[in-house]
Amino acid sequence: MVMNLTNLPSTELLQNVMMASPNGVLVLQAIRAADGRLIDLYMTLINAVAEQELDCPAVEVLGQSFAQFFPHLAEKKLLEHYRQVLDTGHSFQFETHFFRSPQSSPTWLDVSVVQLEKSLLLTYADITDSKIDIDSVPLTDVLQQSFDESVSGISVFEVIRDSNGQISDFELVMINKAGLQMSGFLSKEILGRTIWEMYPATSINGLFDQYVRVYETGKPVSTQNYYPEYDIWREVKIMRAERGIMVSYNDITVLKKAQETVKQQEQLLEDLLEGISVGMAVVQPVRSEKGAAPRIVNFRIMKANAASETVFGQSPRQVVGQLITDAVGHANVSELLNRCAAAVEQQQVFTMSLRSQLDPVMFRVTMTASGDQFILTFTSIFR
């Protein structure tokens, strides 16, 4: 039984989200050395904004090196941050600038990078208009404009204390345009109001305690919060201000729901794997860092079902993470590796002898592409 999982609903959803975004969006896949080091990234999806910036069709860049087309976002120091996002799941946000020919002034980008399953989701917004020459205007005007034009929502609160001197509330004294848009109110409707008046659920989600802790300790806090009453997610950073706290926040609902869909599809794949009586494994190409174009030198097993133990002679838990050459451990492993590499171009179906509990057994092997991974099935042939 062979299943084609190439067009999963999560991919279609992610593409729709990307195309609707007003910012540039890229989905990047890691290129790792045989020892697991991140050496480059290649593009698996880009949206219309990014495609327009490249001035060439998306089909010409998919599968190509990220550094070739976005060198200003692929500097060596940034690559290390991307690796940390992939390995830890913690998001990364930064601003960068570069020069577009023939412009004499730099283009500024606000960039956000998050983990999307085993890929990176990178979004960037052009914030050049918000960057002004600080030598031409007073510093206070620059700071005010930066506050107003920030792509993140920003709210500034002042401390309110009770008769015992304890912090009892925070009063909103400043909020920028992005913050107002997220709140759905006019500034005159919320300035001067307190957190308890505007967001009674603050006690439930624990934010109030974090606000107090940041003000009292001076240590900033970064977190992601879900607001069930509005069904939204926000990435929040809380910092101490002169007489209170400053809270910056971004709406990450679309990203969170896309990640949840990917998780659901991941669970679906797990269920499908375990429901199949033939040996099945999901493998990821391992590419060599030598030469101008990285070539596939092996495959790493990412998932395996219980039935695959008859192929590998090891449990799924033991075999996951191994290279296919180590897991098979048979004289015919070179033939299997060559067949797997050929599946990059088209589906492969072949028959070969592999071990089964250390005894040779003939298997009918099928390898099919599924996005940037491949699905291997092993059906024993009884004679």
Image: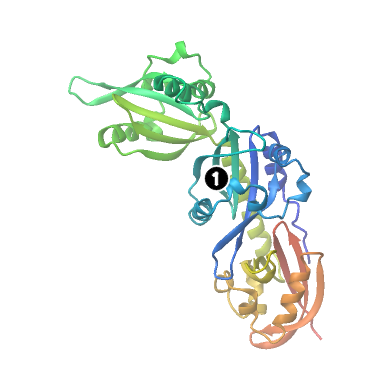
21 or 204: nearer the eye? 21
Q: Quadrant of the C terminus?
A: bottom right
- The relative height of residue 305 versus residue 49 in the rendered view (above or below) is below
Instruction: Identify the secondary structure beneath mark 1.
Output: strand
Label 1 neighbourhood size at 10 Å, few (<14), some (14-19), many (20+)? many
From the top left corner, tell me how far across and down residue 82 is, in percent: 53, 52
- Residue located at (53% from left, 19% from top): 184
Q: Is residue 10 above or below residue 141?
A: below
Task: Check the image and name the residue furthest to the top.
Answer: 188
Answer left or right for 301 relative to 335: left
Please give the name of the residue rendered at 73% of the width and 59% of the height, measured from the top-left corner: 370
In this rendering, the answer to whether 206 lies above or below 376 is: above
Amino acid tagged 1: Val
Q: Splitting the image into 4 quarters, where does residue 284 fall?
A: bottom right
The number of callouts visible is 1
Residue that mark 1 sits on: 113
* Quarter of the image with the N terminus in it: bottom right
Residue 317, quarter of the rendered image: bottom right
Q: Is residue 167 left or right of residue 335?
A: left
Relative placement, left or right, of 156 versus 99 is left
